[in-house]
Image (cartoon, rainbow, N blue to C red):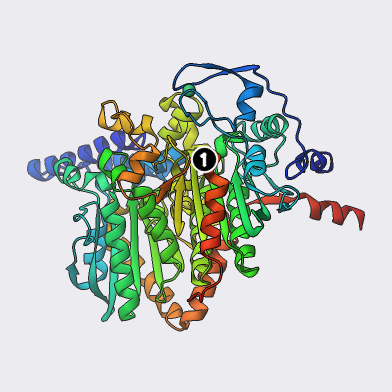
Amino acid sequence: MGLFRKSRYSQVGTREIKDVPKNIASKCPACKHVHISRDLSQKMKVCDRCGHHFSLPASQRLRQIIDHNTFQEWDGELTSLDPLEFPGYAEKLDQVREKSGLSEAVITGRGEIEGQLVGIGIMAPEFMLGSMGSVVGEKITRLINRSREQGLPLVIFSASGGARMQESIYSLMQMAKTGAALARFADAGLLYISVLTHPTTGGVTASFAMLGDINLAEPGSLIGFAGPRVIEQTIGQKLPEGFQRAEFLLEHGFIDRIVERKEMKKELARILALHQGGEQVG
Amino acid sequence: MVDGEKQLEHLERKIKDLQAFAREQEINLNSEIRSLEEKAQAIRQEIYSNLSPWQRVKMARNMKRPTTLDYINMLCTDFMEMHGDRLFSDDPAIIGGIARFEQEPVTVIGHQKGRSTRDNIARNFGMPHPEGYRKALRLMEQADKFGRPIISFIDTPGAYPGLGAEERGQGEAIARNLRDMSRLRVPMLVVVTGEGGSGGALALACGDWTGMFENAVYSVISPEGCASILWKDPGKAPEAAESLKLTAEDLKKAGVIDAIIDEPRGGCQQDPAAMGEKLREQIKIVLSDLKQKDHSELLQRRWERINRIGVWTEMENKKQEISQ
Ligand SMILES: [Zn+2]
């Protein structure tokens, strides 16, 4: 049965994906302005009234960041199983694959950013909220390892609700796996830029997303370990305005820079260029 | 408390009362007592030989279970606790220090729960703040510097979901531990003694060998949390415990742990000293084996151990297999 899926999954990358929005219009959650969905996509999914950054499907992110016709996907055929026979998981996976056109919650590969070759990972918030199971962990780990072997700088865009509980302990262990891979990557003297986007929480925050040499974030992104609702239940009060937002993390020292979506590619290219040449001590 | 334990306790009390009564009154109640004892034994057999995952969760959380400090005191001599992360404060939910195990210096770390409600409040129920992970890493790196093996005891409901913990970056603290534990050049042994609660557990648990107590549990989320997210009903925790495959047996099957350490019938609290002895024997064997390995072998082995964990399929390969 896998053979049929294969062709559908590989629709990511440089090829055009037909964007057929289910909703014709989207309301900005920040300023309540109603946008025509097509217009919003042309504006990189940023509200031009208030600057709110809408959640971005992985394929669109890829087109925004990677130079045209330079992306080469890695491990696109890796597919989740249901090792614990968790109730409803297999059906859920089928539904989400169908709906998102993706095989899993991250796209990995290599490509160029303004002509500079990088290993790139982009998480897909549209695939089970970007949760990390075995496949996400394995794809990220292979991305890190292959980038190290090829001597490439690494850029990962995170967007994740955290661990995928339907894979329980396997999911938890992916945190340790990606962390260990990043130790080897760092010891090779290579650059890792982590970009945290809305939302990045749970096991992804507590592993590769927080371990960049440079941590960037999109404005207004929710970034944390525990989810806001869980915290509110624990402490029995409402969270203060702006808690766990990118600006809050910048203030508390966990983010290097907040970068608007329209500046992101330029900013990444500048950082990459600043790490070109010179003797690296690794 | 596990279902049936109340009844068992009641019976045990009744047996004791009868024995005292028989002694006082100098009458022979032996056959009555024996029949009650047989009944108690049958109940014990019934409730402990075939525990459901949810019953194990309750066993793992039993407040009477020995804590990390109990095990350190049973296994080690010369324990000196060390405090603080050098950055913010000292987290009472994680303890650590230096001690001797079989005469040799070791670094010990672990989550610390309380043995009473008051003690538990002081220990934050064993739920760490970022300071705890950072203290643990500081001590682990010291162990690396001075060539001491590390023994880590895991028993936590999970990271504390509070304001301060988020402000001070618990995500970053856990992530850093996961990365840097993979670099330690000394043997690290991990024992899951009670609750292995998600990232808060994992942050102290990436070693060369993991043993897990028979009634301990280890999962990515608590059964209650899982039930309320997936089914909007924390009351379905017993079903979630089943689905999460969180028992020692499940984890052994998944290749995540190396050994299951049997507990006395009814759990560790029934005979802490016996549990301590069993653990000592196990650690002795594993440690002497790991100490034979040099740094690079140890690091390579640890890397391979963590790298193989996960389950997936690669369709491209499948396709090739089919066409060949
Ligand atoms: Zn707006």
- Residue B187: % across, % down: 41, 74
Q: Relative to B108, is A214 above or below?
A: above
Query: Residue B216 placed where, x, y %?
Result: 40, 50
> Of residues A198 and A33, which is closer to you in this image?
A33
Quadrant in the picture for the C terminus of chain B:
bottom right
- Residue at the (22%, 53%) spot, across then down: B91
Label 1: element kind: strand
What's the chain of the residue with tag 1?
A
* Residue A255, x across and y down, in percent: 39, 49
Q: From the top left corner, tell me how far across and down residue A105 is, in percent.
A: 62, 42
Q: Is residue A174 left or right of residue B48?
A: right
Q: Nearer the viewer, residue A264 or B15?
A: A264
Could you tell me the amino acid type at mark 1? Ser
**Name of the residue lying farthest toward the left:** B24
Tell me if I can see residue A51 in this picture: yes
Please indicate, yes or no, whether residue B148 appears anywhere in the rendered image: no
Q: Is mark 1 within 8 Å of ligand 1?
A: no
Residue holding disc 1: A160
Q: Looking at the image, which residue is at 58% across and 34% down?
A: A56
Q: Residues within 10 Å of mark 1 (few under 14, many from 20)?
A: many
Q: Residue at x 50, y 31 (%)?
A: A53
Left or right of B51 in this view: A134: right
Quadrant including the N terminus of chain B: top left
The number of discs equals 1
Comparing A230 with A8, the one in front is A8
Q: Tell me which corner region of the image, top left, top right, bottom left or bottom right, holds residue A30.
A: top left
